[in-house]
Image (cartoon, coloured by chain):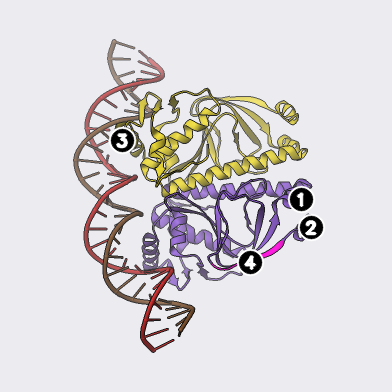
Chain colours: A yellow, B purple, C red, D brown
Amino acid sequence: MPELRELQRLATQVYFRSGKTIFSERAVADTVFGLSQGVVRLYKLLPDGRRQVLAFALPGDFLGMPFAERYNFSADAIGEVSLCRYSRDDLTRFIQSSPNIMRLIIEFAIRELDMAQDQLLLLGNGSAEEKVAMFLVSWRNRLARITPFSETVPLPMRRQDIADFLGLKLETVSRTLAKLEQKNVIRIVPKGVFLTGLEHTLMVTGRTYQPQI
Amino acid sequence: MPELRELQRLATQVYFRSGKTIFSERAVADTVFGLSQGVVRLYKLLPDGRRQVLAFALPGDFLGMPFAERYNFSADAIGEVSLCRYSRDDLTRFIQSSPNIMRLIIEFAIRELDMAQDQLLLLGNGSAEEKVAMFLVSWRNRLARITPFSETVPLPMRRQDIADFLGLKLETVSRTLAKLEQKNVIRIVPKGVFLTGLEHTLMVTGRTYQPQI
DNA sequence: GATGCGTCTTGACCCAAGTCAACTGATTGG
DNA sequence: CCAATCAGTTGACTTGGGTCAAGACGCATC
């Protein structure tokens, strides 16, 4: 699509160091970001400090939505991160100019919605083991689409992040990973895991549950 | 918007009786629906029969998304339901013809996404009591926007539906409602509840948590 | 107005995950 | 190199919600 060329001209490259907040929930969304490098944690907070991690964004993902006046979640960098920053007005004008791009945005939103709904299914119905196993497989699959295949899956996020993503406590995540290692379906390595026979443990009554990739 | 006139011409009215399935997950989405009357339960199933209710649709809501080839959830009628059915191709053509409509669709998708994310926050972090209380308030608020205000909130869905929506078991929903009645913040009536001081119980460390309306 | 079925409630018991706490291992900075 | 700090693991104990089972209630249909 020729429009994508032009889109690049609107972007400013920006960088964030590990742990820095890129934007906060409810702030006016005058800029929209596209993630170029690194991993970003998207989350919501409750007034009492409880946190729900909504997703871990990877290169290629959008952070924030055009047409939304305010961010409806917060985002911060896991490790060093580089982003394309767009002015919301520029982007809105640009999007409106092309039905092709419009459609792309809609499809992106639909994909996001679908992922959120799969996440709902998991949060509402999964045991700790199912949640952790699903998370690992789904994370591995997402990584596989943007980096050359590797047996050992990096986990740049903290246990606490995984816990808040899955609606568990970090001790439970730790214990569950240990249990999966016991079962010989993963091996825990520094800042990552080595997946071996994990697909098997996702079998639910005969059929494999396959969520978003 | 004048376009909405024209949209009506594309619609066929269809009806479903209580409990009937309107469409099923993964089926080819050659039609899209707009809900005119009644309540619809949107849900996903796991292979072993566990169910996650994603939402209860009310009049004015869309079921199914344009541009999505397949439904990514199932829908069935709670009570009698009447819908506008659109052919997906008609609707796609129509949408593409107008940036105004495009924008409307994007905004709808964003709102849906936002609701799903609030639901994630609740499923991941809420106690049974918080979940049920939040559900009642949020349901009351949604109803208030389409029907004249009424103290007693109708609950046309079954306890099992609420349970599957909140990631609880139906016994827990029942018990939790009973507990809220004990606390005098609700009164349980046939097929509904009477809300009195429920807002108070949603206070979390001093500030009220206000989710999607 | 009896019968039967589906929904809802309630009770007793149990277990997966949460809590609290101690400890180990990695990383950073002086 | 050694503190100091933070991330992660592991253990002992508690508990909220799940499970199983009995009963009550509502509401159709005959």
Q: What residue is drawn where x is 69% and y is 64%?
A: B13
| Residue ID for mark 4 | B15
- The reply to whether discs 4 and 1 touch (Cβ–Cβ < 8 Å) is no
Name the kind of residue labelled 4 in the image.
Tyr
From the viewer's perspective, tell me whether residue B115 is left or right of residue A125: right
- The reply to whether discs 2 and 4 touch (Cβ–Cβ < 8 Å) is no
Q: CA distance from mark 1 to mark 2?
A: 9 Å
Chain of the residue where label 2 is placed in the rendered structure = B
Classed neighbour count for the residue bearing mark 2: other residues with Cα under 10 Å, few (<14), some (14–19), many (≥20): few
Q: CA distance from mark 3 to mark 1?
A: 54 Å
| Residue ID for mark 1 | B94
Could you tell me what secondary structure mostly forms the magenta stretch? Answer: strand
Classed neighbour count for the residue bearing mark 3: other residues with Cα under 10 Å, few (<14), some (14–19), many (≥20): some
Mark 2 on the same chain as mark 4:
yes
Q: What residue is drawn where x is 62% and y is 42%?
A: A109
Classed neighbour count for the residue bearing mark 4: other residues with Cα under 10 Å, few (<14), some (14–19), many (≥20): some
Classed neighbour count for the residue bearing mark 1: other residues with Cα under 10 Å, few (<14), some (14–19), many (≥20): some
Numbered disc 2: secondary structure: helix
Dot label at residue B6:
2
* Span colored in magenta: B12-18
Q: CA distance from mark 4 to mark 1?
A: 24 Å
Chain of the residue where label 4 is placed in the rendered structure = B
**Percent of width and height locating residue B126:** 42, 51
Residue placed most toward the observer, A28 or B148: B148
